[in-house]
Image (cartoon, grey):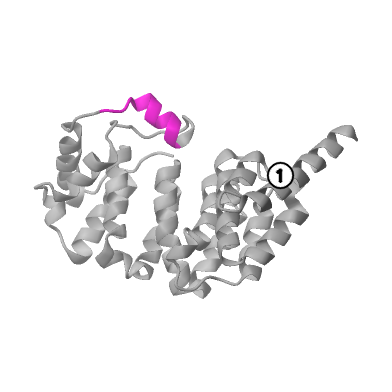
């Protein structure tokens, strides 16, 4: 995807931020970071900055940090849409996850719908899922049609978002969608072969099990032969050893029978 050019209104602010980032101490190899975060497929530049170093930029004496309200939202979202640098995009997302904005996440749902177009690594995907899940909880009727569109998409990052964004971490939800509403999102992607979609499916099944253990376990028992190794590992991560062992035995038996046939 071609990165658009920053508007003249925000270019000076973005250039100042980029220059600040470029001057910070690097401790991670760019290729290693790209491989870890995206499987090596990202088109972004990685400066090799650790998370605490990136976070420190929010307190730096930069003009973009001095903005407030809608001006700040516009400047940070413009940075998200235009910057070619991983760490800059991470900072743009962090503007929306800070407490005073996160509590009003639904107000920025139109921006989050656009944000998905630049997702191409799991770190930015997971942060967006945190924002999307807050919007789902606030107004599922408004948000779910978009998640269904992403679920049916051929874009693996939209597919991943359509499941992880349902709950993110269930313990953070005051109210969760019914099991019957969640299940079709997972079912459609259960046999998807993209690595990060598999991981996302497993993540969501794990969180569903945290909320609906009986229903989710029954679903896993009936469909364990369809789960990839990655989805199986993620979905059973928080289960008791006994439950996990039973599912593992069922999965092994099903795979052995399939090979024999």
Residue 224: percent from the left, percent from the top? Answer: 73, 49
* Label tally: 1
Residue 14: percent from the left, percent from the top? Answer: 20, 44
Q: Residue at x 61, y 66 (%)?
A: 212
Q: Residue at x 12, y 56 (%)?
A: 66
Q: Which residue is drawn at 54% across and 67% down?
A: 144
Tell me: 204 left or right of 18: right
**Is any part of residue 155 visible from this angle?**
no
Q: Residue at x 25, y 53 (%)?
A: 76
Front-lying residue, 146 or 223: 223
**Residue 140 to residue 99: above or below:** below
Q: Is 30 included in the stretch rendered in magenta?
A: yes
Tell me: 224 left or right of 68: right
Q: Give the magenta-colored segment's residue range.
A: 27-37
Q: Mark 1 points at which residue?
A: 248
**Residue 181 to residue 126: above or below:** below
């Amino acid at each position: 995807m071609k990165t658009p050019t920053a508007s003249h209104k925000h270019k000076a602010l973005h250039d100042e931020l980029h220059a600040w980032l470029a001057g910070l101490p690097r401790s991670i190899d760019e290729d290693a970071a790209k491989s870890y975060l995206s499987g090596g497929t990202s088109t972004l530049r990685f400066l090799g900055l650790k998370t605490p170093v990136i976070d420190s930029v929010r307190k730096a004496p930069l003009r973009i940090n001095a903005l407030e309200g809608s001006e700040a939202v516009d400047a940070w979202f413009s940075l998200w849409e235009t910057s070619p640098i991983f760490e800059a995009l991470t900072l743009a997302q962090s503007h929306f996850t800070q407490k005073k904005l996160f509590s009003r996440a639904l107000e920025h749902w139109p921006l989050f719908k656009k944000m998905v177009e630049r997702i191409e690594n799991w770190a930015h995907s997971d942060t967006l899922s945190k924002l999307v899940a807050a919007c789902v909880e606030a107004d599922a009727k408004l948000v779910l049609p978009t998640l269904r569109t992403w679920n049916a998409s051929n874009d693996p990052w939209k597919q991943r978002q359509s499941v992880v964004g349902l709950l993110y971490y269930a313990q953070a939800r005051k109210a969760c969608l019914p099991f019957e509403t969640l299940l079709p999102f997972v079912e459609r992607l259960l046999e998807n072969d993209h690595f990060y979609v598999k991981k996302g499916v497993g993540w969501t099944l794990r969180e569903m099990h945290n909320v609906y253990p009986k229903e989710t376990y029954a679903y896993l028992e009936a469909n364990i032969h369809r789960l990839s190794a990655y989805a199986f590992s993620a979905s059973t991560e928080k289960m008791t050893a006994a439950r996990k062992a039973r599912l593992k035995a069922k999965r092994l038996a099903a795979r052995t029978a399939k090979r024999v046939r």
